[in-house]
Image (cartoon, rainbow, N blue to C red):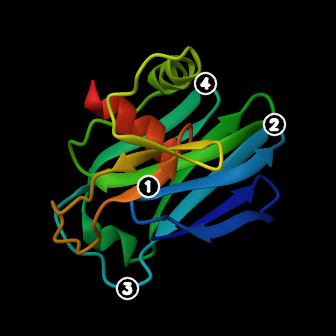
Amino acid sequence: MDVKVTNSGGNVVYRGKTDAAGMFETKSLPPGNYVVQFNAATTAKGGPLALLVEAGKQQTGADSVPASKFNKGGVAMKIEISSAATLTGHVAPAGTKMATSTSTSNTSSTATNGKKSKLKTKVVNGRTYVWIKGDDSMGSSFGGHWAPEGSPEAKIAEANAR
């Protein structure tokens, strides 16, 4: 999915794509109002989708968005950032349990407190990675993959493993 983030002046502050898990993350953005636009690069298939966009404690989301909406002009969401924060987002099948700000921060502190993750982990060159299972609910051919511990997709996978 293509992702574009614009500020209140209409300037593009981020342009990218979601990864295989449907996640994206911007650099730290200053306080202000932003619009996050999701468009499908190719024809979006599958059932309705859910969206979650977060910046610190602020979040906005939508559930049951028809996949066809991503091809016909896309889907736009507004979010206000009250203090400098990284903007993260997740696109997943409707009904998927997605992490909130609270569970995201709890997942991060659990890992740093030395408690064992519920996910399979490995350490490479001193950095911990967690195994993210592949999602075949939408007919995806993507298998699982390793993601850095603390990344947005690892936090969501950890929250869903509870």
The image quarter in which residue 142 lies: bottom left
Q: Residue at x 65, y 42 (%)?
A: 126
- Judged by depth in the image, the label closer to the viewer, 3 or 1, is 1
Q: Please report contact status of discs 4 and 1: CB closer than 8 Å, yes or no.
A: no
In the rendered structure, which disc, 1 or 2, sits on the residue that comes first in sequence?
2
- Judged by depth in the image, the label closer to the viewer, 2 or 3, is 3
Marking on residue 146: 1
- Judged by depth in the image, the label closer to the viewer, 2 or 4, is 4
Task: Residue 7: give x, y in percent of width and height.
Answer: 76, 54
The disc labelled 1 sits on which kind of residue? Trp
Q: Give the residue pinned by disc 2.
A: 31
Q: CA distance from mark 4 to mark 3?
A: 32 Å
Q: Is residue 42 above or below residue 142?
A: below
Q: Give the residue pinned by disc 3.
A: 42
Dot 2 lies on which element? loop
Q: CA distance from mark 1 to mark 2?
A: 32 Å
- Quadrant where the C terminus is found in the figure: top left
Residue 52 makes an appearance in the image: no
Dot 1 lies on which element? strand
- Judged by depth in the image, the label closer to the viewer, 4 or 1, is 1
